[in-house]
Image (cartoon, rainbow, N blue to C red):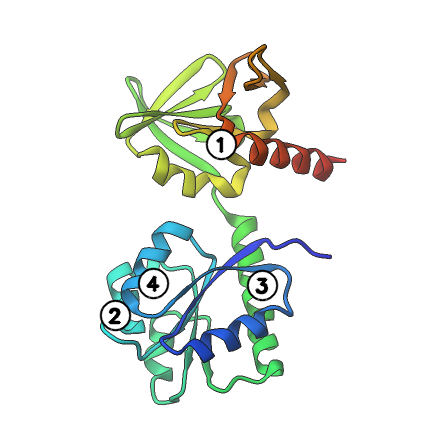
Amino acid sequence: MKQAKWKALIADDEPAARRGVRQLLAAFPEFVVAGECRNGAEVLAALDNSSPDVVFLDIQMPGIDGFEVIKRRTVERMPAVVFLTAFDQFAIKAFETEALDYLVKPVSEMRFAATINRLLKRLQSSERVREETILVTTSRGATVLHLSEIDWIEAAGNYSQLWVGRRNYFLRESLQLLEKRVEQNGFIRAHRRALVRLDGVRELTRTRAGASIAVLSSGVRVPISRRRSASFTAALRQQAVGHD
């Protein structure tokens, strides 16, 4: 069975419509439903909190409609958008927002499958060309860091401290925001103030008190909080299986 790789957000003020999309999406195990929204305000919040790869977006919702969501968020900061509506007169305006597709309810399984195929092509293409770098400023000017060379990231107030071996760089971005940028590249929370790149973990050990410690290739030891221990260990095992 394929593992879910992409996150979907379903936004519609009608529970039956949301349920219908969820049922159609169930045929595609590459996707997991990250959340459901009843109005535009909830969509804007969910876009920040769950960072979906696609949003199935109703146009006419109470308060903030689908078009206003995109206007406030901006096209550049939106995930792939598939409009779902009971009306066909908004199609031209929808594609002006660079929407991937425009589906008129009720949607057939065949029509939905065609949309998903287009969506997968876009997401897979975006993954291949994604620029996996971070630009940091140093006393000597700007430096480009590849995510694959960053061992771990530590919170430092409103900044994040990026560690490459024993060298460190400061980035003016909070750890919470940065986490959303790097989680697709193998970083995971070790504790409230640290992210660790799984590929850089040499071993997982325990203290005499039973606390977990991630020993990185650089020799740095990063403690794993009790709350994160199980998920961290599971992610590390999954990473090892993927490399076999």
Cα distance in 3D space between marks 4 and 1: 28 Å
> For numbered disc 3, what is the local secondary structure?
helix
Quarter of the image with the C terminus is: top right
Query: Which residue is identified by label 1?
Result: 227
**Do labels 4 and 1 touch, CB within 8 Å?**
no
What amino acid does circle 2 point to?
Answer: Glu
Q: CA distance from mark 2 to mark 1?
A: 38 Å
Residue carrying label 2: 68
What x and y, as percent, mark residue 72? 24, 62
Q: Residues within 10 Å of mark 2 (few under 14, many from 20)?
A: some
- The reply to whether dot 4 and dot 2 touch (C-beta < 8 Å) is no
| Left or right: 202, with 46 as reference point | right
Q: Nearer the viewer, mark 4 or mark 2?
A: 4
Picture disc at residue 120: 3
Spatial CA span between label 4 and label 3: 22 Å
Residue 84 quadrant: bottom left
- Residue receiving disc 4: 43
Task: Report the disc number at residue 36.
Answer: none
Q: CB atoms at circles 4 and 3 under 8 Å apart?
A: no
Please determine whether, in this image, residue 88 is positioned above or below residue 199.
Answer: below
Between 217 and 225, the one lying in front of the other is: 225
Q: Amino acid at mark 4?
A: Val
